[in-house]
């Protein structure tokens, strides 16, 4: 997979099949998701990876409910879920392509513009930093049952999602500066 994420790699890009480009985008988004939430137990194999869809119109390509309204047709989509190995540490998750510094990290420099634009909306302004406002943290906790959630997870650990999100945005910005937006936003 690594050869597809580096604009300097001579490997043929984009893949000739549309579903492979979709899969590369999903995988990159999954790397970002796992890094931000601090997930440590999802690998490149079939461990803790879930997808939905990918069924044919007739429902013969996979096991689907008989009721048409319950089917997810079209290309398979990655399910961005985690069931327990996140939010336990302030440290960056080991094995993530975003963990570490420039010399220890694999240079992922191809992203979906829509993902970048969404992340960028949550970056702190100077005023936010001055007043200790964390837009992503505030957004996330506004959608959770606070009493129950913070009985399980420490608030300080959840606050690190803001710092990790901003690291990803900085890395994408560096890629754009180095390679140009036309080579970075291709997924």
Image (spheres, rainbow, N blue to C red):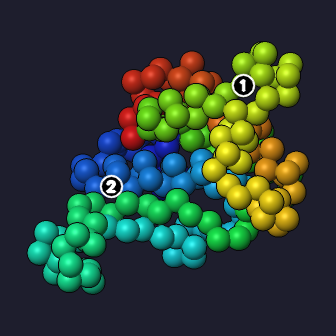
Given residues 37 and 43, the one toward you in this image is 37
Q: How many marks?
A: 2
Q: Residue at x 63, y 50 (%)?
A: 143
User: What x and y, as percent, mark residue 113?
Assistant: 44, 32
Q: On residue 20, which mark appears?
A: 2
Q: Are marks 2 and 1 in contact (CB under 8 Å)?
A: no
What x and y, as percent, mark residue 45? 53, 73
**Residue 161 rendering spot, x and y as whole percentages:** 74, 45
Q: Identify the residue shown where x is 70% and y is 33%.
A: 135
Residue located beneath label 1 in the image: 124
Residue 93 in the image: above or below residue 165: below
Q: CA distance from mark 2 to mark 1?
A: 34 Å
**Viewer-nearest of discs 2 and 1:** 1
- Residue 88 shows in the view: no
Residue at x-position 28% and y-position 56%: 19
Up-down relation of residue 126 to residue 112 (above or below): above
- Residue 105 shows which numbered tag? none
For this view, does 128 lie left or right of residue 81? right
> Which numbered disc, 2 or 1, marks the residue that appears first in the sequence?
2
Can you see residue 106?
yes
- Give the answer, above or below, for where 111 lies relative to 38: above
In the image, 152: left or right of 113?
A: right
Residue 16 drawn at (x, y percent): 24, 49
Report the side of 24 relative to 85 (left or right). Answer: left
Helix or strand or loop: what does disc 2 sit on? helix
The residue lying toward the viewer, choosing from 113 and 119, is 119
Residue 121 lies, with reference to residue 94, above or below; the image says: above
Q: Secondary structure at mark 1?
A: loop
In which image quadrant can residue 10 be found? top left
């Amino acid at each position: 997979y690594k050869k597809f994420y580096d604009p300097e790699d001579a490997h043929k890009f984009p893949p000739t099949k549309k579903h492979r480009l979709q899969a590369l985008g999903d995988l990159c988004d999954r790397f970002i998701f796992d890094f931000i939430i601090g997930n440590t137990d999802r690998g490149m194999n079939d461990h803790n990876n879930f997808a939905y869809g990918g069924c044919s119109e007739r429902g013969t390509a996979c096991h689907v409910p008989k009721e048409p309204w319950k089917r997810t047709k079209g290309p398979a989509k990655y399910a961005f879920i985690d069931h327990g190995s996140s939010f336990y540490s302030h440290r960056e998750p080991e094995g993530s392509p975003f963990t570490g510094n420039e010399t220890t990290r694999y240079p992922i420099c191809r992203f979906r513009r829509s993902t970048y634009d969404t992340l960028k909306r949550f970056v702190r302004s100077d005023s936010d930093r001055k007043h200790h406002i964390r837009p992503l943290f505030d957004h996330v906790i506004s959608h959770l049952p606070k009493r129950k959630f913070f009985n399980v997870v420490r608030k300080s650990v959840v606050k690190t999602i803001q710092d990790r999100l901003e690291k990803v945005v900085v890395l994408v910005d560096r890629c754009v500066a180095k390679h140009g937006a036309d080579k970075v936003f291709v997924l």
